[in-house]
Amino acid sequence: MAPNIKYSVSKEDHLKAIFHLQQEQGMVTTNALAAALQTRPASVTDMLKKLKEQKLLNYERYKGFKLNNEGRKAAVQIIRKHRLWEYFLVKKLQFGWDEVHEIAEELEHVGSRKLIDRLDAFLGFPEADPHGDPIPDSQGRLPVRRQVSLSQLPLGKTVQVSGVASQTPEMLEVLQYNHIQLGTRLEIRKKFPFDDSLEVKVRNRPPVTLSAQVAKNVLVNDDEPQTERR
Amino acid sequence: MAPNIKYSVSKEDHLKAIFHLQQEQGMVTTNALAAALQTRPASVTDMLKKLKEQKLLNYERYKGFKLNNEGRKAAVQIIRKHRLWEYFLVKKLQFGWDEVHEIAEELEHVGSRKLIDRLDAFLGFPEADPHGDPIPDSQGRLPVRRQVSLSQLPLGKTVQVSGVASQTPEMLEVLQYNHIQLGTRLEIRKKFPFDDSLEVKVRNRPPVTLSAQVAKNVLVNDDEPQTERR
DNA sequence: TTTTGTTTTTAGATTTGTCTAAAATTTATT
DNA sequence: AATAAATTTTAGACAAATCTAAAAACAAAA
Ligand SMILES: [Mn+2]
Ligand SMILES: [Mn+2]
Ligand SMILES: [Mn+2]
Ligand SMILES: [Mn+2]
């Protein structure tokens, strides 16, 4: 079970990009996908026809598109591989947070199912990659983690850093300098309306100030008491 | 230094196969390479032109070919990657000896130089892969290990198993059954001229019999006192 | 040294993935 | 509603890697 279906590198990259784009918008557009993949709209249209042919997405010309069930399953498997390899690179090979994406972009295309399940076990079934993004499990279950930007939260709240939107070396530097990493708990102490900067406090440390740009890119667990559903 | 040159998967596979073939024969032939790569002679000729164009080998039509210095360097880097990944798969992910080649055949094409050097360090700079083949170091130095088939050695000698020529599951089974693995020291006790089978003895174990076919595929360190050179 | 057989190369096609330029379609603006 | 602008698709081309069938070169045998 869970066989070893293999698509071309390019197809896999398309599937993955479509998956990410349709998380945000419902339907994906040709231009958006071309931008995400650094390719041309005409090339995207070509690929869409092939993916439709292979029954991986729903697509009517001029109407936008989105993955169907098959396509979503395939995309999630690639994301699983990508994130597990990123975790491996950071935790076992001492890579920095900002160095791993490119390499994982290649490793994610290595086919063997057994390889990735063994890697998962070797790593101790991690739940999130080095950027805080959740890792799908062997069955393709992808936990939906509600993340909220630090800049959107009210004063006084204590939250846990669970991800970063901007994964550049510069962003990494700021966070390291302020002793903030994934899992760090912090309290929002003060907001300066003048520049929308925040003062936050990490346990056992003096408070630090984060610019609006930084705060916007720090994602935290939304521990908000769940809106009751009945 | 040691930059990150990248060729296509197919070119890398060709370089590697040529390297292996020219170890045995000096000059490589079109047919031999086609057989090794499971492709057609015409396709090989096409690729040879491209590799010559890129100055990776010496080739005159109808005259055979062999890698030049550049080509040899490239091939060794791929072999380094292949064997390090094989070692990783067996030692860290608990793969069997006979399962790793296919997977390494894909992993070897992942580009990052830094990745492979970090992997090397993570693994403790192993000297040989799970089949006993030597792993080139970061500078591309590939130790020439003199290996001799068990069937070619005189009676009474004690030798150390350092490789296997046939890497099938069936061969693995025979060796495991007889408690022989890489590094095992054994003594050749008896030869039966009738079927060329051998009796060998591993320390602290009862002697076992190996068929001629098995013995031929067991490679051992040639501890022969070096022929003096002056 | 012809003849025969084998190896290698060429000629021409095919598949996959990409591109540019132009046409078609949809969306937004007067 | 007509026009303008943006998006998307098509048409046609190209590079890479492969293939089959036929031709060319080389090697072996008669
Ligand atoms: Mn990728
Ligand atoms: Mn990530
Ligand atoms: Mn390979
Ligand atoms: Mn090996």
Image (spheres, coloured by chain):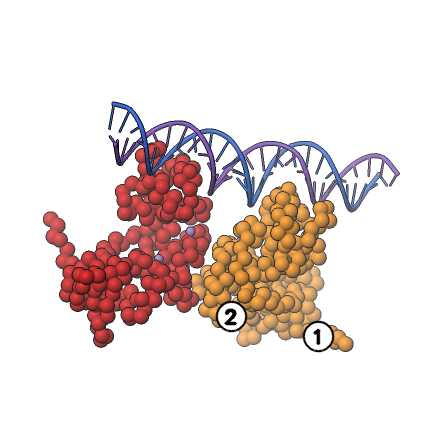
Chain colours: A red, B orange, C purple, D blue
Which image quarter is the N terminus of chain B in? bottom right
Picture quadrant where residue D15 is located: top right
- From the viewer's perspective, is the residue at label 2 or at label 1 nearer? 2
State whether residue B159 is above or below residue A12.
below
State whether residue B122 is above or below residue A107.
below
In front: C26, or B51?
Answer: C26
The answer to whether residue B20 is visible is no
Q: Chain of mark 1?
A: B
Q: Are marks 2 and 1 in contact (CB under 8 Å)?
A: no
Picture quadrant where residue A223 is located: bottom left
State whether residue B70 is above or below residue A189.
above
* Residue placed under numbered mark 2 in the picture: B125
Q: Earlier in the sequence, mark 2 or mark 1?
A: 2
Which residue is at 47% across, 67% downward? B118
Picture coordinates of residue A128, whole percent (x, y): 31, 60
Q: Chain of mark 2?
A: B
Image-based side of A229 in relation to A166, left or right: left
* Residue placed under numbered mark 1 in the picture: B226
Image-based side of A131 in relation to A10, left or right: left
